[in-house]
Image (cartoon, coloured by chain):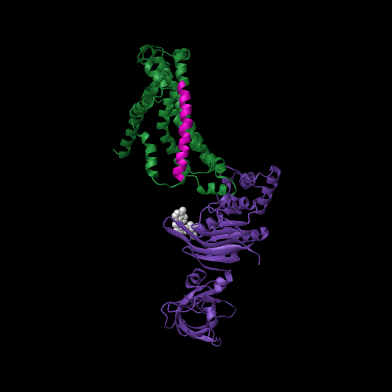
């Protein structure tokens, strides 16, 4: 594997007495699409700005491409930023905006012109160079901001919630365009977002942040399948939580009694944080099955009452109150041909397996 | 009667008291009589000719213009520095410092004039046009700070960061991004300082050495009743000039606010 393009080690950040980042450590790989995901106010923008050089770190180091950034100001770092507000210069045309950084590098005029045109083409704005930038729509401004940063061929492109201001349709289109663009240019992207779906669909790897700390750094699949704690599990997708009592924890497995489901022996790798009194069992909605036909069977079965049914055409979501549990669990079922859809108040048999249960702290 | 009617009446009376005296200036400036009183006699441009031929008036005008231009440039530059600092950085004693800068706005000019006079003489400087500039800068700077603060505050800070991020130095960022975007505020501040300085009397009266400014000259001429109509003519010119400058300031501000799509970049009118 190649060296990481960015190495963050032991970063603390204080604003006065308020600590915004706590001992952040991470390595970002060359050429990957990396996301910083977390609820609003958890410190994503702060971390991005320390990488860009807009904020000094209170402790720790940022290293980019093997170089310490300790005394390197933002204008000499090999990073460029797409701001949340896009920060398009309103008194310049689209082409002047894109040429802005190249002019600072004293590139010859002809070369600038060619580079600007190529960059605009890359973001789908060919021929828009002479437009006044303030006359562009939100989506177009964002493309200008992208072109303005990419034309400088930075080692890392930093994007702060670039899609949050767009409407849903535009956002989905830009998600796939950004992904394609990243592959085409091969530059490392670091995207800040609070939208877990956006992070899951776009990223190679994701750092999930809570209150100034990285909770977990992993691939989307790993985050979804093997969240390291309850906080991450709750933030990524839907997770059902059930009380559990661990009766025996010897020999790399845990013997458990899970409320509403029953007994199971769970391997230690499904308990990433270890086991203590605070541990709960977590099960994803698609890992539980509604056994709606007489002759459908599962390795393990539990039973409950259907409380609500949400029919989506291709999928049905059930809220089922398992016997002996006071809150419903969500179960999702694909509506394959011939599968019966239960209704409210029906008694449901629920199939499950020990391999789909996580023990989380 | 509805309260709205009273309010309109009040506004009407208010506007008459405010502007009617000024409107008398042009009326008597063109009146063919050396006595300023009704009934009007006839139309003449004679009083403007008199102005043209008065040598001392020309000197006074030159003095005033020199002072007003210097004041506008210095006060606006100081305003830019103060407004930029107060809108971008938080520092200890910021409120107090900004408060002291704004105080001359409400200080009686006679106090400013007298105290400056005492200080300047004590320090052993001679009175000159530059001492007047000093006094005018003092009273114009608060206006500039007020106008420019709102211009700087309405400037999206990420624009400056973007420029820095794209490889420009802090200084280049200031000239290429900050200044063009606050330029309407700068023009506005300059024109208003210029206008204030041009017709300021009390400070100029105290701090003038041997060279009078235009208002000081006018005041000196008021002793001679026969000069009154030509002073009316002069007043008319000054009135039109002031209005034109203020209107220009406002026009530039609005036009550029529209052009850049920035919400109200800080005007005074
Ligand atoms: N300049 C600042 N001064 C003081 N506190 C700040 C500053 N910038 C951010 N914060 C605080 O730091 C925390 C993290 O902010 P931020 O990084 O913007 O969060 P996010 O981008 O994840 O929403 C927030 O509680 C915010 O109030
Ligand atoms: Mg943010």
Q: Which of B123 and A335 is in front in this view?
A: B123
Residue B55 lies, in percent from the top left, at 46, 13
The answer to whether any part of residue A291 appears in the image is no
Q: Nearer the viewer, residue A43 or A332?
A: A43
Question: Residue drawn at (66%, 51%), measured in percent from left and top?
Answer: A119
Q: Tell me if B200 is positioned left or right of A94 in this view.
A: left
Q: Which chain is purple?
A: A
Q: Does residue B11 lie above or below A167 as drawn?
A: above
Q: Tell me the quarter of the image containing the C terminus of chain B.
A: top left
Q: Tell me the quarter of the image containing the N terminus of chain B.
A: top left
Number of numbered discs overlaid on the protein picture: 0
Quadrant assignment, res B133: top left
Residue A284 lies, in percent from the top left, at 52, 76
Residue B66 is a magenta residue: yes
The answer to whether any part of residue B210 appears in the image is yes
Quadrant assignment, res A277: bottom left
Q: Which of A237 and B84 is in front in this view?
A: B84
Q: Nearer the viewer, residue A31 or B10?
A: A31
Q: Point out the residue furthest to the left here.
A: B1
Q: Which chain is green?
A: B
Magenta-drawn stretch, dominant element (helix, strand or loop): helix
Quadrant assignment, res B260: top right
Residue B134 lies, in percent from the top left, at 42, 28
Magenta range is B63-87
Q: Point out the residue furthest to the bottom here.
A: A295
Residue B216 is a magenta residue: no
Q: Does residue B136 lie above or below B164 as drawn?
A: above
Q: Does residue A169 lie above or below A133 as drawn?
A: below
Q: Does residue A62 lie above or below A106 as drawn?
A: below
Residue A112 lies, in percent from the top left, at 68, 45
């Amino acid at each position: 594997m190649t060296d990481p393009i960015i190495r963050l080690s032991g970063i603390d950040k204080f604003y006065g007495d308020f600590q915004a980042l706590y001992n952040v450590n991470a390595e970002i790989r060359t050429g990957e699409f990396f996301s910083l995901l977390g609820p609003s106010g958890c410190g994503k923008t702060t971390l991005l700005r320390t990488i860009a050089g807009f904020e000094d770190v209170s402790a720790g180091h940022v290293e980019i491409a093997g170089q310490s950034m300790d005394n390197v100001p933002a204008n000499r770092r090999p990073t460029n930023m797409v701001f949340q507000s896009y920060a398009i210069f309103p008194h310049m045309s689209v082409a002047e905006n894109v040429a802005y950084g190249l002019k600072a590098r004293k590139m010859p005029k002809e070369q600038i012109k060619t580079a600007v045109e190529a960059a605009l083409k890359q973001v789908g704005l060919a021929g828009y160079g002479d437009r006044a930038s303030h006359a562009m729509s939100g989506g177009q401004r964002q493309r200008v901001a992208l072109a303005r940063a990419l034309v400088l061929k930075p080692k890392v492109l930093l994007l702060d919630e670039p899609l949050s201001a767009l409407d849903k349709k535009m956002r989905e289109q830009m998600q796939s365009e950004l992904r394609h663009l990243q592959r085409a240019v091969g530059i490392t992207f670091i995207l800040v977002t609070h939208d877990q779906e956006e992070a899951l669909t776009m990223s190679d790897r994701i750092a999930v942040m809570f209150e100034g700390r990285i909770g977990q750094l992993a691939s989307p699949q790993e985050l979804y399948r093997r969240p390291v704690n309850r906080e991450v599990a709750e933030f990524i997708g839907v997770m059902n939580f059930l009380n559990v009592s661990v009766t025996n924890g010897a020999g790399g497995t845990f013997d458990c009694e899970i409320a509403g489901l029953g007994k199971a022996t769970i391997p230690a790798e499904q308990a990433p944080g270890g086991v203590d009194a605070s541990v709960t069992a977590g099960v994803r909605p698609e890992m539980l099955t509604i056994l709606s036909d007489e002759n459908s069977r599962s390795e393990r079965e539990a039973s409950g009452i259907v409380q609500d049914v949400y029919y989506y055409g291709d999928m049905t979501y059930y809220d089922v109150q398992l016997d002996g549990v006071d809150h419903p669990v969500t179960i999702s079922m694909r509506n394959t041909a011939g599968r019966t859809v239960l209704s409210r108040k029906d008694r449901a048999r629920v199939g499950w397996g020990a391999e789909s249960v996580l023990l989380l702290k | 009667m509805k309260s709205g009617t009273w309010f309109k009446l009040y506004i009407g009376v208010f506007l008459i008291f405010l502007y009617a005296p000024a409107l008398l200036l042009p009326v008597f400036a063109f009146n063919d009589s050396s006595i300023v009183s009704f009934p009007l006699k006839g139309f003449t441009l004679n009083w403007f000719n008199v102005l043209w031929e008065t040598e001392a008036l020309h000197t006074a005008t030159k003095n005033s213009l020199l002072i007003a231009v210097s004041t506008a440039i210095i006060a606006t530059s100081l305003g830019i520095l103060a407004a930029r600092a107060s809108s971008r950085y938080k520092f200890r004693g910021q409120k107090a410092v900004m408060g002291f800068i704004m105080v001359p706005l409400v200080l009686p000019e006679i106090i400013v004039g007298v105290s400056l006079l005492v200080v300047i003489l004590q320090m052993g400087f001679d009175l000159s046009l530059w001492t007047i500039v000093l006094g005018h800068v003092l009273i114009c700077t608060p206006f500039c700070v007020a106008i420019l603060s709102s211009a700087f505050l309405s400037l999206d800070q990420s624009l400056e960061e973007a420029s820095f991020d794209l490889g420009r130095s802090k200084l280049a960022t200031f000239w290429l991004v900050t200044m063009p975007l606050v330029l309407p505020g700068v023009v506005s501040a300059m024109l208003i300082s210029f206008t204030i300085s041009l017709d300021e009397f009390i400070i100029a009266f105290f701090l003038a050495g041997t060279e009078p400014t235009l208002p000081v000259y006018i005041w000196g001429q008021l002793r001679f009743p026969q000069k009154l109509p030509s002073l009316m003519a002069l007043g008319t010119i000054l009135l039109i000039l002031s209005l034109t400058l203020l209107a220009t300031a406002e026009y530039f501000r609005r036009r550029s606010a529209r052009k850049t799509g920035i919400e109200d970049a800080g005007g005074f009118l």
